[in-house]
Image (tube, rainbow, N blue to C red):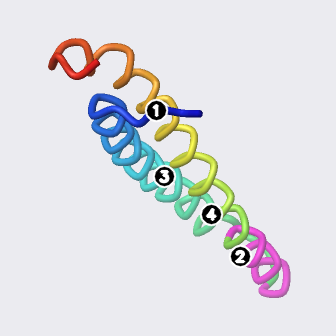
């Protein structure tokens, strides 16, 4: 069974914040590319619907991955540093 540690939870919170910031940066860049894209309106609508799905996938993957890495690093380094092993 998995043990929850204070260091791991702190690391997971920091990882989730980093994941959110990374998501915002990626989506900002993706929106810029979409705005510069030329093409017919029907083609643009198709791309916009695909971008909506892509946003959700990026958010889910990014936040989950960064949270997991943050938990692992927090349990490994922050926990022993604060004496919460």
On residue 3, the disc is 1
Q: Nearer the viewer, residue 74 or 41?
A: 74
Marks 2 and 4, how far apart in space? 10 Å
Residue reaching furthest to the left:
82
Marks 2 and 3, how far apart in space? 17 Å
Whichever of callouts 3 and 1 sits on the residue coming sooner in the sequence is 1
- Check the image and report above or below for 13 versus 43: above
Residues marked 1 and 2 touching at CB (< 8 Å)? no
Question: Mark 3 or mark 1: which is in front?
Answer: 1
Question: Mark 1 or mark 4: which is in front?
Answer: 1
**Residue 47 position by quadrant:** bottom right
Marks 1 and 2, how far apart in space? 42 Å
How many numbered discs sit on the rendered protein?
Answer: 4
Residue plotted at (47% across, 58% down): 28
Name the residue beneath numbered marker 3. Answer: 23
Residues marked 2 and 3 touching at CB (< 8 Å)? no
Name the residue beneath numbered marker 4. Answer: 55
Residue plotted at (49% across, 29% down): 69
């Amino acid at each position: 069974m998995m043990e929850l540690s204070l260091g791991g939870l702190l690391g997971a919170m920091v990882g989730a914040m980093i994941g959110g910031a990374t998501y915002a940066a990626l989506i900002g860049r993706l929106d810029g590319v979409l705005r510069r894209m030329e093409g017919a309106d029907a083609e643009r609508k198709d791309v916009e619907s695909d971008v909506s799905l892509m946003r959700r996938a990026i958010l889910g993957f990014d936040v989950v991955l960064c949270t997991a890495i943050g938990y692992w690093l927090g349990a490994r380094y922050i926990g022993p540093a604060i004496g919460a092993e």
